[in-house]
Image (spheres, rainbow, N blue to C red):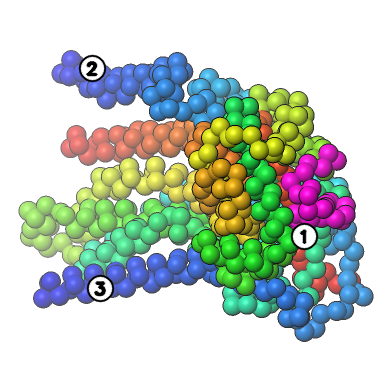
Amino acid sequence: MKSKRVLAALLAASCLATSFTACSGDASSSSAAESSAASADASSSAAEGSSESTGLMSDEEIIKKASSENKVGNWGLGNEYEIQALLSKYGLPTDYITMDFTMDQIDKDTITLASAMTFNELGLIKNNYDGGYNYGDEIGVIDMNDQGVAMLEDNLFCTKEFAKNNPNTVKAFVAASMKGWTYACEHPDEAAEIVFKYGSSVSADHQKYMASEVAKLVTTDTKGKAVSASDVGKMDEDAMQQTLDLAKQYIKLDDATAADKLAKLTLDDIRSSDYLTYDGGAVEKSDLKVQLKWLPQAQFMGYYVALDKGYYKDNGLNVEIVSGGGDVSETVAVSNGTVDFGVTWVSNLINANAGGMELLEVAQVYQRSGLVLCYKKSQFTK
Amino acid sequence: MKGKVIKNIITTVGLPVLFGALIFTLWQTKVLHTLFKTDEIILPLPTRIGSIIGDNFTNMLPQIASTMIVALGGLILGSIFGYLIGVAGAVFKKWGMGGLTIVSAFNAIPLVALAPVINNWTRDLSSVVDIRSTVAKIITVTIFCTASMSVNAYRGLTEVKPFLEDLFASYGVGKFKMFFKLRLPNSLPYVFTALRVSVPACIIGAVVSEYFAEQVIGVGRQIRENIIKGQFPTAWAYITVACVMGILMYVILLIVEAIVLKNRRAR
């Protein structure tokens, strides 16, 4: 009798436990699904009841309204500086609400002005795939480049010491990687398929959407001018300086030593364009690892293309791509020698160098900011 | 007798302090860095961490206050809730054990899974982010603190010495009175046993729940932000603050426990 009761209790407990794991499992699978959404034909999926752009507020009015309601969203963790620069530009407090890695908050209106990367979250909120939010043209966008607060994002970096000791390796790696990026931007669909083959975190359709959007970031600068294929990876002086200036203004450091170092940083402390051309010299180190900033996806398609097409092998390199994600810190991984190269945002590199690391950007892949604030037009009609 | 007390103090206070001093020395003289093959960026020197705390203490206060509200709120609610479950289990013996098993199962849910789920649940609670985010964090800590209290309260309420039960019964004491005069006082030491687990746990719970919160505030949030941004000295400063918070609360608990249980032991 007693054993029966214990059994029943155990059964009840295990039922509860499974229902709970199912629940938390749901949360994570929905975040996976959010990524698997999106289509390349965002515009053709067009939502009904849009196009009443006549009554829409101006960008400034939208930003002010969202800020006054404390409904501006960002992920934080070093992704917030452009948003804070934008808020400051309009004389607003720099507070924001933390977004998780889904777009549920804008969907449910707990955030009305949400951060999104053009190549990822923006596709998810607009497109109509399974797990997507299917808002189509109902979604409006405020572009950081247009607002003059763009900071450069995905780059390629290593430690200063590594660059000094292995100049040919760095040059060979950069050259092969940029060749991969050039090819990927010219053939985004094929690049998306290659990324998918190498263990994608998102669906094939979203990968294609992402590849086409990333190509735009690599081949267009902050002012909207085209960047030629041979210039992929170049460091635009003005855009780099703007990134550094904004970083100095909005990176707030409690550590007095680091804050002092940040204030004194110049472009020469964080980047060198000496490694952009490779003349075929023998490489000092051939086995290399590159740490991505996030999970495998078309955001990093150039490296996967270079690997797949054998561009690295052609330069005598044996490259392993290490995916990131979650709380993996690419700056730490490179700084302590776990990997040789890393992909990060310029602001993260500035932050890390202020904190005492000695990192050096050797190529700037994204030529314009991919960060936008997106909103439902219905929330901001006059 | 006196010698024994002194010996006690040496072993309970002296040795841990000595050990702490040893670690501090090894750390400051960078022996630890060589030992663990790490550098001053990842593991800054204690003096640097200390100076950051000193420079920013006033800035840290709102972060500490926020974490403390969440930790204490969750601890109090979780303890009350847990005790009530224990009482319910002791009163309704038939399904008491089963209910406690379920509560223990709750305790097995990892905090990192629980926090985001509760964030989603509380999203419609209020349009003010500070309110709904604080509530979400407190609920997370509450669940984290409930289980140990309920299990211990149940044991304290039911594991009464049989002869006392017989004695009370022989006096013709009713169940209700026996509960208040015998079972409730009997459970007090067990409550402190539970608190010894849940007091440090509530700080951990608060810190981790801040990782996932919508609000950009709290000691835990600062730890995560600074680690990801490569600002390890500042991250360590907040880690130290979190440790001190936990230790202080534990010390307060021990003092309260000594005062409350002293009379009982003497009797």
Residue segment shown in magenta: A215-238
**Residue where numbered disc 3 is placed:** A11
Which amino acid type is shown beneath numbered disc 2? Answer: Ile
Instruction: Mark 1 or mark 3: name the one nearer the start of the chain.
Output: 3
Q: Position of residue B208 (x, y in %)?
A: 48, 49
SS class of the residue under badge 1?
A: helix
Q: In the image, what residue occupies the spot 83% across and 39% down?
A: A237
Which amino acid type is shown beneath numbered disc 3? Answer: Leu
Mark nearer the viewer, 2 or 1: 1
The residues tagged by marks 2 and 1 sit, at their Cα atoms, a distance apart of 74 Å
- Residue B62 appears in the picture as rendered: no
Task: Report if the CB atoms under discs 2 and 3 are less than 8 Å apart.
Answer: no
Q: How packed is label 1: few (under 14 Cα within 10 Å), some, or many (20 or more)? A: many
The residues tagged by marks 1 and 3 sit, at their Cα atoms, a distance apart of 55 Å
Q: Chain of mark 2?
A: B
- Residue A56 appears in the picture as rendered: yes
Q: Which mark is residue A216?
A: 1
